[in-house]
Image (cartoon, rainbow, N blue to C red):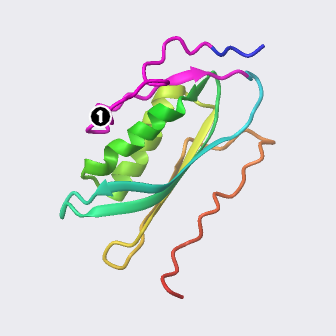
């Protein structure tokens, strides 16, 4: 029987205020109940928002996070609040994208993780950021991230 102990969680099931910055955001984890089984967990954030560090104007992205758990899963409410904390955070696209991925890797120590951050155009140029921890385990089905490249009105 899978371990489903969630007794240490502080946000799940409570009214939780959104963190003001990514640094103060708390990411929580729960036990992965299927040790030894390689499967992909996907989180999609199609309305991610941060601020341009130079102009203070909002930047928008569609972020897809795929990972293969080892012993832990990220608790989804804490991830949602973590991603929300970027709304008043000024950072370049690359910094936001890689920071998100590395925080999750530090928390979970997954077998594998990749992030695809598909940023909407700024100054007429979309910036997409991709990173992964290495090669995924052999034999794992990895679906495409499903985000079309930016095409404007064409």
Q: Is residue 97 magenta?
A: no
Relative side of 5 to 129, left or right: right
In percent of the image, x 72 and y 54: which residue is there?
143
- Considering only vertical position in the picture, is 61 above or below 6? below
Relative side of 25 to 20, left or right: right
- Considering only vertical position in the picture, is 83 above or below 126? above
Choose between 24 and 133: the one closer to the eye: 24
Stretch of the chain drawn in magenta: 5-33
In percent of the image, x 18 and y 64: which residue is there?
55
Question: Residue 96: percent from the left, percent from the top?
Answer: 36, 49
- Considering only vertical position in the picture, is 113 above or below 126? above
Residue at the far right in the pictured view: 139
Choose between 98 and 81: the one closer to the eye: 81
Most frequent secondary structure within the magenta stretch: loop
- Considering only vertical position in the picture, is 78 above or below 64? above
Q: Secondary structure at mark 1?
A: loop
Question: Residue 148: percent from the left, percent from the top?
Answer: 59, 70
Q: Quadrant of the N terminus?
A: top right
Q: Mark 1 — residue?
A: 23
In percent of the image, x 50 and y 86: which residue is there?
153
In percent of the image, x 48 and y 18: which residue is there?
9
Q: Is residue 21 magenta?
A: yes
Question: Residue 132: percent from the left, percent from the top?
Answer: 55, 46
Q: Quadrant of residue 78?
A: top left
């Amino acid at each position: 029987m899978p371990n489903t102990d969630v007794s240490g969680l502080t946000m799940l099931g409570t009214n939780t205020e959104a963190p003001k910055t990514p640094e103060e955001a708390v990411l929580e984890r729960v036990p992965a109940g299927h040790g030894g089984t390689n499967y992909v967990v996907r989180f999609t954030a199609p309305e991610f928002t941060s601020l341009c560090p130079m102009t203070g104007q909002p930047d928008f992205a569609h972020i897809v996070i795929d990972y293969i758990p080892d012993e832990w899963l990220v608790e989804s409410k804490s991830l949602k609040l973590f991603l929300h904390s970027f709304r008043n955070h000024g950072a370049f696209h690359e910094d936001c994208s890689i920071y998100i991925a590395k925080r999750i890797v530090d928390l979970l120590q997954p077998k594998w993780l990749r992030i695809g951050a598909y940023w909407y155009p700024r100054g007429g140029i979309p910036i997409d950021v991709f990173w992964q921890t290495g090669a995924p385990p052999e034999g794992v089905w990895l679906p495409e991230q499903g985000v079309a490249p930016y095409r404007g009105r064409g």
